Amino acid sequence: MDQFSRETFLNSLAQTTDAPYLIAVEKAEGIYLYSPEGKRYTDLVSGIGVSNIGHRHPVVVQAIKDQLDKHLHVMVYGEYIQATPNLLAAKLTSLLPPSLNCCYFVNSGTEANEGALKLAKRYTGRTEIVSFRKSYHGSTHGSMSVSGNEVKKQAFRPLLPDVRFIHFNMPGELDAITTQTACVIVETIQGDAGVRVPDKAYMKALRKRCDETGALLILDEIQCGMGRTGTLFAFEQFGIVPDILTVAKAFGGGLPIGAFVANRTLMKSLTHDPMLGHITTFGGNPVCCAAALATLQVIEDEKLLEGVEAKGELFETLLKHPRIKEVRRIGLLFAIDFDSAEFVSRIVEEAKKLGIICYWFLSHPYSFRIAPPLTIAPEEIEESCVGILKAIDNASR
Ligand code: PMP
């Protein structure tokens, strides 16, 4: 059988769109993907926010191999003492403010948010959740309930009750957060809304309102965390600390792992009333934890955060084209706006022909995203920008 059969892909694997991207990938290394025919693609989207340290980073691959030689899954979450979850929890909390000192490992972003929402309800004894228009928090029922895209939710109701939506970065609406509110869940930088960076004063006002009302603040850094914005976590740039932080995507360096992180007094509430308040079979899988631990080490050892802003600026300087309407950027996370969704699709297709992967956003069709591995070199940025500008020209014809 042709391993890369398009027919099998289209018929035996569930499809979620009528227009999948449809390149075949045999190998990936650094910022590049390679097709079975040897065509090289520059991955400017990091597999949607995952490959922040590049594909198959050798340190991550080695850590995975080392763990494979010890043990794979041995028990459900939270029962046996295993080295890699222990080391990962110690490392992650050492990089966070002291109040965020306890980690719960899960398997994905949406699960991290599910856990965070449950923890907030359990700890506060309240039911109401405040979220934001245009937000994206995942595709399972709870995370979808607090996501802002109405079109995506319509067919799946009823969803969670007691969710109120306010506009992002609008201080006048913070009054919606009250003493009834269990938690506010918010992306520090709205990603799939097309990279919306809030004002620092707004984030401080949001933190203050949560403090005044006793609502817990959940920051979803699943897309904007892990160095993407130039600091390990984006909230560091806003002078606030969440009550619960959620991470996933790039956290695992290419393996599936997420986490919700909080203070241990909060987290303790999952041990009683009911006991086993949140459980998972595979959360904290030792191989995934080994990969995540190695990823944090790579970010530190290679001083990847230091280069992010300059690389972002280089992209911004080089990406000048009369068809570009607006560029929104923080660190190495970009939304490039054009005047129609149809034109964006043409650019994405033209870029693909040129071996460059850019991609659209879930809730903002007039833009494409650029979020390359943080390891991208200046020459590779230059080469990529030449390709993107050519793709825009080609799409304009
Ligand atoms: N939160 C944010 C901000 C995200 O960008 C995503 C994924 N795009 C998720 C949550 C959900 O993550 P996952 O797909 O791993 O469930």
Image (spheres, rainbow, N blue to C red):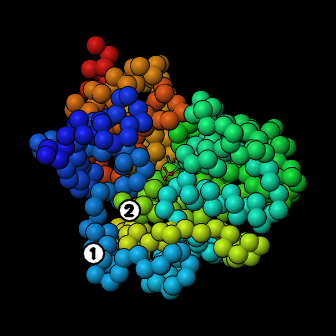
Residue at mark 1: 65
Q: Amino acid at mark 1?
A: Lys
Say whether mark 1 is within 8 Å of ligand 1: no
Residue depicted at 52% across the width and 65% down the height? 106
Q: Is residue 158 left or right of residue 94?
A: right
Label drawn at residue 255: 2
Residue depicted at 50% across the width and 51% down the height? 223
Q: Quadrant of residue 167?
A: top right
Specify which label sits upstream in the sequence, 1 or 2: 1
- Where disc 2 sits, the SS reads loop
Residue depicted at 40% across the width and 25% down the height? 344
Front-most of residues 272 and 195: 272
Image location of residue 298, percent across then percent down: 37, 69
- Where disc 1 sits, the SS reads helix
Q: Amino acid at mark 2?
A: Leu
Image location of residue 162, percent across then percent down: 78, 45
Image location of residue 306, percent across then percent down: 42, 60
Please determine whether, in this image, residue 326 is positioned above or below residue 181: above
